[in-house]
Amino acid sequence: AFSPDGQRIAFRSGRDGGGIFVMGSMGGSVRRLTDFGRNPAWSPDGTRIAMTEDVFDEPYNRNIISPLWIVDVATGEKTKVFDGDAAQPAWSPDGKRIAFWKSDWGNAQRDLATISVSGGDPVPLTDDPAVDWNPVWSPDGRFIYFSSDRGGVLNLWRLSVDLESGKPQGEPVPVTTPASWAGMLSITSDGRRILYSALEFRTSVDQLALDIENGKIKGPAETIYRSSRQVRDAAVSPDGTMVAVVLTGTREDVFVMRRDGSDLRQLTDDDAKDRGVSWSMDGRILFYTNRTGQYEIWGVRPDGSGLAPVTRDSPYDQWFPQMSPDGTLLATHDDQGASVVDLSKPPGEREYRKLPLLENGAKFRPRQWSADGKVLLGNDWDAGGAHLYSPETNSYRQLSDVEGWVGWLRQNEIVLQINGEDEARLIDVGTGEVTPLQLEGLDGVGFRWPRVTSDGKHLVYAVEQIESDIW
């Protein structure tokens, strides 16, 4: 972010543990300002910087609360302004208020708000099912421009705002651009032009052959399905004949198709956010959804019948369901950590038991039960290392400190681990031995939502290609 006089740049860097840094606009003279923080925004007089604790460039995917801070550029003194969620802060021209967007964990809405730089309660600007994000002020302080899907796609909108109170004046007005996804907004100092990024998505569901005996994942990949919508999740049925996916855009719904990509069927069709598909051993598709207000687990048959809640009245959100093979235990997680509930008990008697934190204090993210249901495989939420959880002993065993998705092979013996650098390895659960896998005939795959088929012969995953332009 350029300072108001254009002489300095504030930026986030991962160097030396990460934080906000400041340097001259021509480079050089880099100075650390904080040891944490993202999305720096300068005050109009250039003396302070607003920042949040995490970065967000994609409004549909949020899984952490990001408080709002202000730091003094001269002294480095930090003040927490708001302990709730605040993404992409934007300072008002008079320096008295900060606009931001937030995720409401109770109903999963994405709305805009303003807050006084001295703190207090935020003033809502929007409060509706539309996804509203990325606010920027007009130089005269009369309007806030933002990106929203309230018109069907993520496009540019404008809202009149009372600068003194931060309250909205009327309803949002479209400022239509030729993009189907517009964001990362920046307005010129004279208020006459807006810079934005336009994205186009192309996604597919692919599969690769696993040659575990010879230590290879063999290409080329076979494409099962292509879409202009984003594929958020992909999960293979226990019998290996079907693939469930979540297709996203302005809506997020569950679909199912045959393993060859034929017979695509839409199973949910509503305004609720339906996410995190997995399968139960009896052939139901499980997912988490906010259709009742908070995120709970629901299930549906591949033919579209039997849509019904699996959990009810949980004391906290339920994300990414993983059902044990016998159907009695359901593992989920949210931003507070993992939990397990015993579904064999009547709904009124069920205890949603939070799992302990890992030894390093990080939260555990469940991935898959072992075939015998005795241990739960998962990742360190922060560092991504692989761990096993035992419900019997209520304890963990670390398999790897390397980041990467994990899934079972060979029943309870071998774990496959894949990271974002397209590196794969096998972990022997008994001995702890790690064996690298060779990716043959593959280059820059970018595995997303990988899952291993139940016979251990194929890896099914999503591939996303993004084209972006600056307008």
Image (cartoon, grey):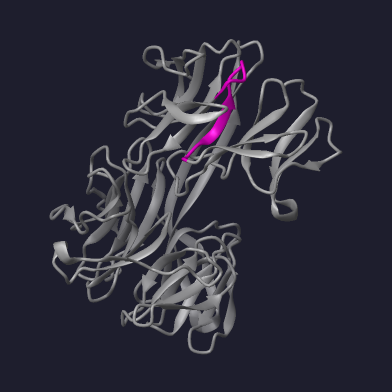
Residue farthest bottom in this picture:
431
The quarter of the image holding the C terminus is top right
For image coordinates 80% across by 30% down, the residue present is: 25
Residue 237, x across and y down, in percent: 29, 66
Position of 93 relative to 420 (above/below) = above
Q: Is residue 175 visible?
A: no
Position of 464 relative to 201 (above/below) = below
Position of 95 relative to 355 (above/below) = above
The magenta stretch spans which residues? 84-97
For image coordinates 44% across by 69% down, the residue present is: 378
The residue lying toward the viewer, choosing from 449 and 259, is 449
The residue lying toward the viewer, choosing from 455 and 101, is 101
Please give left or right for residue 379 compared with residue 313 in the image.
Answer: right
Please give left or right for residue 323 compared with residue 431 in the image.
Answer: left
For image coordinates 44% across by 59% down, the residue present is: 461
- Residue 89 is covered by the magenta coloring: yes
- Residue 377 is covered by the magenta coloring: no
The quarter of the image holding the N terminus is top right
